[in-house]
Amino acid sequence: MSKEITLVFNNEGLRSYIEVDLCAECPRQDDKGCCGFYSPVFYSADLAYLIINKPDLIDRIFSLERLTILDHSVTVNNIPEGRSYYCRFHSRTEGCLLDQPLRESICRHFVCSGIAWEDEEELVDWKNFIKALTDYEINLNQRLSEAMEAQGLTLRDSRRRNLYLERLVQLYRQETEHLPDFISKMPRQETYKLKRTLRFGTDWEL
């Protein structure tokens, strides 16, 4: 079965994301798709963004059970269900309950392998953009983590976590005051349509 798939690339700087219309009717047909095989990890830049833009979500994240809290990241571990898992931010009827910019980087950039958009020659600029953005975010998170370590602060210490987050926001604002040029060189949004042969169930590659 051949189907036209629409991809919308959104350049929102550090919170850039890819929308895929096929997600609403995922060929996996299990009401979970890729969300059933990944636990969201919120790193320093994610946490700082959430504090500034959606502070109640930070409170919700740290109130959840089955968290893995490291010095500078928090993983919201999925719950086992059948042969896969379910994500605490996923609804069987509505998909992800978080707006795109609020999601961590994997959830914002991931497109299943069955679509293979990276193979399209006309999308090479977006492929390079996502790679450059990923590298920049990794380096940013490293700088933020090192700065917090230098202040003797860690997310593991729940008693000083509010201080950690307060200092993190200050550093994040300083670090992101001037973003790299590759971000401004890409358009704010572009839409592409691809045709792919669909396979269903576990035959569809995530």
Image (tube, rainbow, N blue to C red):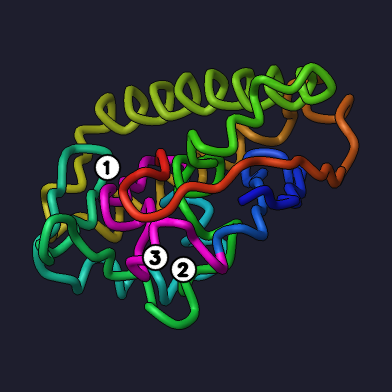
Label 2 element class: strand
Q: Quadrant of the C terminus?
A: top left
Residue type at mark 1 is Ser
Which residue bears the numbered disc 1?
73
Residue 138 is inside the magenta segment: no
In whole angstroms, how far apart are the C-alphas of marks 3 and 1? 32 Å
Label 3 element class: loop
Crowd class of label 1 (few under 14; some 14 to 19; many from 20; radius 10 Å): some
Sequence-first tag of 2 and 1: 1
| Image position, residue 170 (x, y; %) | 51, 45
Above or below for 61 versus 147: below
**Which region shows up in magenta?**
24-45
Residue located at (41% from left, 51% from top): 47
Residue located at (81% from left, 45% from top): 193
Which residue bears the numbered disc 2?
96
| Image position, residue 16 (x, y; %) | 67, 44
Q: Nearer the viewer, residue 152 or 83?
A: 83
Indicate which disc residue 53 carries.
none
